[in-house]
Image (spheres, grey):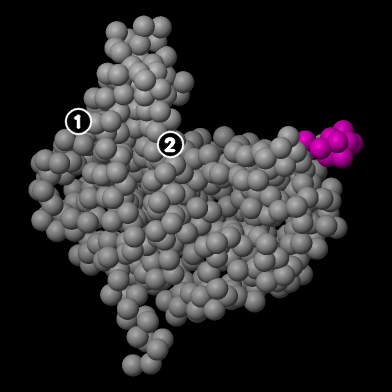
Amino acid sequence: MNKLMHRDALYKGLLPLILCLALTVSLAGHVSGAEQMGAGFQVRGFHLDLRVQVMKMPALRAFAHQLSENGINTLIMEWEASYPYQQHQVISNRYAYSREEVKSFVAYCDSLGIDVIPLQQSFGHVEYILRHYRYRDLREDQKDFSQVNPLKEDLCKALFTDLYRDLIETHTSDYIHIGGDETYLLGHSKESQEKIARVGRGRLYGDYLKMLCELVVSLGKRPIVWADIALKYPDAFRDLPKETVFVDWNYGWPLDRFGDHRQLVESGYEVWGAPSIRSHPDNYFLADWNKHFLNIQSFVPQARELGYKGIVMTSWSTSGIYSPVFESSSDIIDLPAIRRVYPLTGFNLLVAAYFESLRSADALDINKFVHTYTRETYGFDDAAADVFWRALTMTPYEVTQGRVSHPGMTVSALRDSAMLASNLFRQLKPSKNQDEFAHYLLMSDIRTFYLECMAVEYQLNLPDLGGATPGELADRLRRLHPEELDKRFIDLQKHAFYLSELNLENELRNARLKSLLAKLEKVTD
């Protein structure tokens, strides 16, 4: 066996350990290619976000193998700073892959029939580029590094020509995804405001987008763009290259959320749809499973009815919004992500639901799917499946400034609900795939831990501490034992992610507890 065959065999053998993607052949019921997916989409895709939680290369290959086994033929890679740039090495971070790793991964995916499309943000969401002062002249704002100035067209064109050419060297796809979504600073600079006064905000966006799309076409590739801003400003559709593809991302809202959806459908451009399995309000402490199931159930068949050529499941590791850390009034030294989400390894159930939704022209039957999946994957009977679903979807509400997003519910009541969910998970006894099942229990226990912290914090904000003493509140926090959760988290994730990443996840997740406990212990000294 040569080296490559040996490595591929190793990765294949690591599948159950790395991602525990235990969807069985009987559940999948797949054959091959287009026949497997029935009368579905030509482009059947998945999006991987590596802005945080950069997966080890064996885990990436294992996941690609699982996607291929279930009929996925397109993988959009949001490499961000994990990509090994050549001319712009300052952009790459400590977890950047080598160029040989990227090329080998793309070749492996090619062998599986998966087209790897690089996603290179080129307008908004470019903090990872603009944070470096080499690119300071491209910024729309010197204290918010999220967006380029669209009037610095020559500088931006030079930069992204370099980056696109770099990606073309390592990828074989006919496409480059250039981003273009959530341009929150559109019209922020003085120059941008002056152009808006002359021609409008839509042209400010559309002219820059046109330059990027034409650049991609000149390099022999087709540009892909998120559709939200163009929907908001329909004149942005004007004069773009006919090769442009728009991706209509919809995470469970009406079609006209961003603008008149008819403008997109009738634009003449190729359109793909994009639901999500990790998005708002998900974070460390909350996963709204029912929302994502309903998103799959409704939007996948809706995209079919609209005649979309493709569908791409997105999976966001973070919101893409960052909180600047200033060393002085004018020097940002760090940009930590505001919201992080439980790793993709814990969402096999939703990944499998997406696979299932592509196999039939009918909308996903959520109840039937959950019962089938839990029977085949965990050995549950119907009664256990119902308990599982109840625990999984119980009270998925947020807490903001001491208030629960559900009217009339208190933080303490929400915490008690989370404790009940954890107890329900503990009652279930899977006969197989215990490692995959362990993710649900850990997520539930992390949520309970967080809500107890929030309940203590809420009492700390009451004039009389809710009748408690600082010492009593501190004791409640000490009983949480985050180190036990930290160990479980690392044990479940270490095959897919770097230990330093996992330690950082634990540190950030525990920050609120440590701050509260330090304050209470100071008061009781």
- Residue in view at x 19 percent, y 30 percent: 420
Instruction: Give the amino acid at mark 2.
Output: Ala
Instruction: Identify the secondary structure beneath mark 1.
Output: helix
Q: Residue at x 61, y 62 (%)?
A: 92
Residue 8 is inside the magenta segment: no
Q: Quadrant of residue 355?
A: bottom left
Q: In the rendering, at what x and y percent does residue 152 appear?
A: 84, 51
Question: Which x, y percent locates residue 177?
Answer: 62, 60
Residue hosting label 2: 511
**Residue 420 shows which numbered tag?**
1
Left or right placement of residue 54 versus residue 385 in this view: right
Crowding at dot 2, Cα within 10 Å, few <14 / some 14-19 / many 20+, comes out as few
Pick the front one: 309 or 508? 508
Q: Position of residue 421 (x, y in %)?
A: 22, 34
- Looking at the image, residue 193 sits to the left or right of residue 315; the answer is right
Residue extending furthest toward the front: 525
Image location (x, y in percent) of residue 350: 34, 50
Compared with 96, 127 (above or below) is above
Residue 269 sits in quarter: bottom right
Q: Gap between marks 2 and 1, in whole Å?
A: 25 Å
Q: Tell me the quadrant of the picture where the N terminus can be found.
A: bottom left
Magenta highlight on residue 196:
yes
Q: Is residue 19 left or right of residue 139?
A: left
Q: Which secondary structure is most common in the magenta stretch?
A: helix
User: Tag 1: Cα neighbours inside 10 Å, few (<14), some, or many (≥20)?
Assistant: some
Q: Could one spot residue 206 in this view of the protein?
A: no
Q: Which residues are magenta?
A: 188-198
Q: Residue at x 40, y 28 (%)?
A: 518
Quadrant where the C terminus is found in the figure? top left
Eye-nearest disc, 2 or 1: 2
